[in-house]
Image (cartoon, helix red, strand yellow):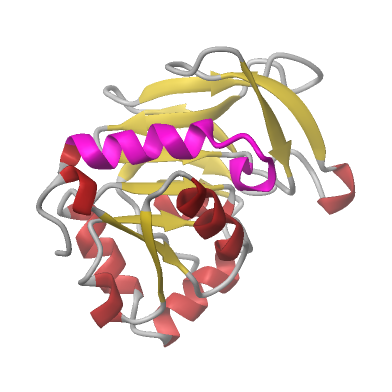
């Protein structure tokens, strides 16, 4: 692994598909040492990993083709800090409702997610979100987003939808070194969720 001390931690962004560039920009704005990860040897060099939004079935297939699927799964299982947004949340979940045929995930988070729970791309929306551990509201950007249907004991619920027909649905969770959100903090100028993850990485280091 790359860094032994908090300030040396290297955060990788899985750059196979989706909005990985936006995540890298958010992390770099916070001064975090950030690299793109596309191959197993690159994964070995990082202390933590962001799994971006995108399309979870495409991500699964590309990870398999790039021989990244098992290495990521193993690093997450071994305790590497990881942060998934939207499709990344699906990829970190142990269980999926409405999965594509044969779809597999990296797993690690003992939660059940529902793919495209909020509807199609045209039903994308923004919603103020109260996030446990962050003062003040965030803007949650939801694009064909999943939600969390069920969490196992020990999973911390950090945010729920507070308005509309999906009121009460879980949209952010944490367990240990793993963090996942249904929404896209990387698509706003608010860096507080990324800052939350960077502090998790530093604590783990």
Residue at 72% over, 38% down: 141
Which quarter shows the N terminus? bottom left
Look at the picture and state if 178 lies above or below 17. Answer: above
Left or right relative to 94: residue 75 = left
Left or right relative to 5: residue 63 = right
| Residue at the left extreme, as displayed | 4
Res 179 → quadrant: top left
Residue at 12% over, 47% down: 5
Q: Position of residue 187 (x, y in %)?
A: 68, 47
Residue at 27% over, 23% down: 154
Q: Is residue 45 visible?
A: yes
Q: Position of residue 106 (x, y in %)?
A: 36, 59
Residues drawn in magenta: 184-203
Q: Nearer the viewer, residue 186 or 182?
A: 186
Res 196 → quadrant: top left
Q: Nearer the viewer, residue 49 or 88?
A: 49
Residue at 23% over, 39% down: 202
Q: Position of residue 91 (x, y in %)?
A: 46, 56
Residue 159 within the segment the image draws in magenta: no
Q: Is residue 149 visible?
A: no
| Residue at the right extreme, as displayed | 122
Residue 188 within the segment the image draws in magenta: yes
Magenta part, dominant SS: helix
Which quarter shows the C terminus? top left
Left or right relative to 60: residue 121 = right
Look at the picture and state if 153 lies above or below 184. Answer: above
Look at the picture and state if 113 lies above or below 166. Answer: below
Res 75 → quadrant: bottom left
Q: Position of residue 127 (x, y in %)?
A: 75, 26
Q: Nearer the viewer, residue 61 or 17?
A: 17
């Amino acid at each position: 692994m790359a860094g032994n001390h908090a300030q040396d931690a290297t955060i990788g962004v899985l750059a196979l598909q989706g909005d990985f560039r936006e995540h890298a920009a958010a992390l770099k704005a916070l001064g975090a040492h950030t690299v793109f990860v596309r191959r197993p040897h690159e994964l070995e060099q990082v202390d933590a990993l962001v799994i971006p939004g995108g399309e979870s079935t495409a991500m699964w297939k590309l990870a398999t083709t790039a021989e990244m699927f098992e290495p990521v799964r193993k690093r997450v299982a071994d305790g590497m800090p990881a942060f998934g947004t939207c499709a990344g949340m699906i990829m970190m979940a142990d269980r999926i409702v409405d999965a594509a045929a044969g779809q597999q995930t990296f797993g690690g988070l003992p939660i059940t997610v529902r793919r495209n729970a909020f509807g199609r791309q045209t039903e994308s929306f923004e919603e103020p979100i109260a996030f446990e551990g962050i003062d003040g509201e965030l803007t949650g950007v939801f694009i064909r987003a999943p939600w969390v249907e069920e969490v196992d004991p020990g999973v911390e619920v950090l945010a729920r939808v507070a308005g509309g027909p999906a009121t009460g649905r879980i949209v952010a969770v944490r367990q240990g070194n793993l963090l996942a959100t249904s929404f896209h903090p990387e698509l706003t100028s608010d860096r507080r969720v990324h800052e939350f993850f960077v502090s998790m990485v530093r604590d783990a280091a």
